[in-house]
Image (cartoon, helix red, strand yellow):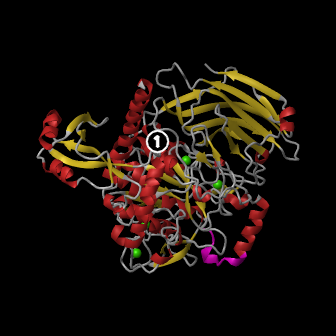
Amino acid sequence: MLVLKLVNTIGIILWLGSFLLLNVSSFVINNKLDHEADLNNKEYIREWAAKVSDPVEADLIALETGFINRGPIQPFDDIYLFVNPEVPHRSKRHAKEHTERLNNHEKVLWAEQQISKSRVKRDNLDEKFDKRAEKEAYRSVSYDDPEWSNQWYLRDKKSLETDTPILDLHVITAWYKGFSGKGVVVTVLDDGLEWNNTDIKPNYDPEASYDLNDNDPDPTPRYDPSNENKHGTRCAGEIAMVANNGFCGVGIAYNSKIGGVRMLDGRVTDRTEAQAIAFKHKYIDIYSSSWGPNDDGRTVEGPGTLATEAFIKGITEGRNGKGVIYVWASGNGGRHGDNCDCDGYTGSIYTISISSASEHQLSPWYAEKCASTMATTYSSGAYSEQKIITTDLHDQCTDGHTGTSASAPLAAGIFALVLEANPDLTWRDMQHLVAWTSQYNSLAQNPGWKTNGAGFKVNSRFGFGLLDASALIDSALKWKTVPTKRICEVIPNGFKPVEIKTGSPIQIDIKSTGCKGEENNHIRYLEHVQLYVTIEYSRRGDLHLNLTSPNGTNTMLLSERSNDASTSGFVNWPFMSIHTWGEDPSGTWTIRINDRSKHDNIGRLTNFKLVLHGTYEIPEYMKNGPRNYDEKFVQKETVKEQSTEKRRIKFKEESDETKPSEKLVGKMRFNNAANDDNEDDLTSSEENFMNLLLKYFNS
Ligand SMILES: [Ca+2]
Ligand SMILES: [Ca+2]
Ligand SMILES: [Ca+2]
Ligand SMILES: [Ca+2]
């Protein structure tokens, strides 16, 4: 009996704990939703949360209004739990008279009766709210812009009729919650901006604009017969097209300020890039870049000295020290078998690298794979699939914007809504939010998904999945800034170069404590992981590189690139991965390098180090356990990965069919190859032939 009582008491405490945690914030966030309207599965209980102006008098307030004060609701010191014994334990009816009595007390700022919901994790709760809010939002939001009805990636009407997930970026719900980018400044770094376009002009911000090519304040593009410089204008429109002006479409952040830096129409140097990346970095909040090194499948290139400094300036000094948000397109080199692991701009820890999914929830033919991609938005796909609507040169509108170029600005627009919802977010908060809220469900039919040691689902084509503007905002509104960032370097002691050759895979085990015992370096919760390598090799494109974490998460850091015949190898190249996000880095990391080609290659690994980024303390959002993925509608792995060869054929067909003006926009300085999705690159027989096994112990 006593035991039973005890269990009961603990149960109630636990129940109370989770209940309060989940709901105290949700009624603030969802205050636009009518609680009375949807209480089918919920019941009112005899508890109230009351915010008081004078905590010392909480007992007196309770007494005067007929409640029992049960003390402050942690972690709030001015919100109290009041209980009313006259009210039933559970009831379908809101005890309005008691709520009113509390609210009418001069020292009560607000009070709300608590509602009992099923004890599920945060994600499911949000989802229930979202479906309802979303339906209402979709009914109430309408615009007179002629292309609005064709903006399929923002308004999936089909799934509103059914119970299935809504297949769009959930932006309508974000608007409905009251966010449209007000007060947020976004700048597109590109080939110019036609700022006097009807759908741009009202939101154009000359303070956030410049022309680095001609060194003047006006970023208007250079017009030529082929409209070569339409790219920047197209990217900007996706973010900030004016809503309800009877022209073109609706930008995601239609009340944001939009700027353009013209920098791609001329010689691009480290200086030009650096000036663009840190341009007015104390004024601009978000930079959108849909360009990078050549996507030809044989380039390995990253930011130079100045550009690297510029990124650091942006993230340390921008937004009053909270850091600017750099959004980057992951690259369009799929048909050339390119791999964004060889692109140091997407691979930078400071950029949020965005890939694409087509209208039919598939990885498009141009997409690249890599471990640094953080998330995905919609874009063009096969010829018959819809493309993206946006502003075009000569005060026009186009429905033909394509590639990952079109995906990054959609993300930039969404991040503008998120920064409006919570201006206190840091550049790292935004990345954690993306990991925590991006949607895997609708992309689940694609190959390559894995669940890492911290419970995050991740895929080298999509990162953490499709961005969800509504979920981002819900989480952003109750976000607690992530703990201080730490860096832990794992350097092998007395490393001697290791030979690499065709058919002889090498494996190196390196032990890490996560810098345990080092006061400012010990990491227990990972963010980014970088593996710096220096490799001399006779044919770089034949190399295959994997990294396995102590939790067993196996990440492909480099796949073969058939176009890459370079003999230059890699010189202190940082391969970057977000696939072990949230994991504890202590234990054995395994590096595997392989050449499965028929070429007679030879070379050596001359140096490497592992650089771990993360925190010692657990980020607040992870405290209630790992992410809870609702897999009710998930369709798993029905699509086979296309080989590079098939992608090439596909590209040829598309090129033949596609009008020249609608071809993939060529401003990406593109790159790599992805012809299999098997991250377990070594077969067991290969393992047996492994000619080298080295173990290094670090601190
Ligand atoms: Ca100019
Ligand atoms: Ca418009
Ligand atoms: Ca990045
Ligand atoms: Ca690339």
- As for residue 474 lying within the magenta part, the answer is no
- Left or right, 97 with respect to 580, comes to left
Residue 324 locus on image (x, y percent):
42, 48
Q: Decide which of 106, 427 is in the foreground and name it.
A: 106
Pointer 1 residue = 312
- Left or right, 566 with respect to 191, comes to right
Residue 6 locus on image (x, y percent):
41, 27
Q: Quadrant of residue 355?
A: bottom right
Q: Quadrant of residue 237?
A: bottom left
Q: Is residue 283 visible?
A: no
- As for residue 661 lying within the magenta part, the answer is yes
Circle 1 packing at 10 Å, graded few (<14), some (14-19), many (20+), is some
- Left or right, 22 with respect to 149, comes to left
Residue visible at 51% across and 70% down in the picture: 156
Amino acid type of the residue tagged 1 in the rendering: Ile
Q: What span is in magenta?
A: 656-664
Q: Decide which of 595, 602 is in the foreground and name it.
A: 595
Q: Decide which of 27, 147 is in the foreground and name it.
A: 27
Does 322 appear above or below 253? above
- Left or right, 244 with respect to 127, comes to left
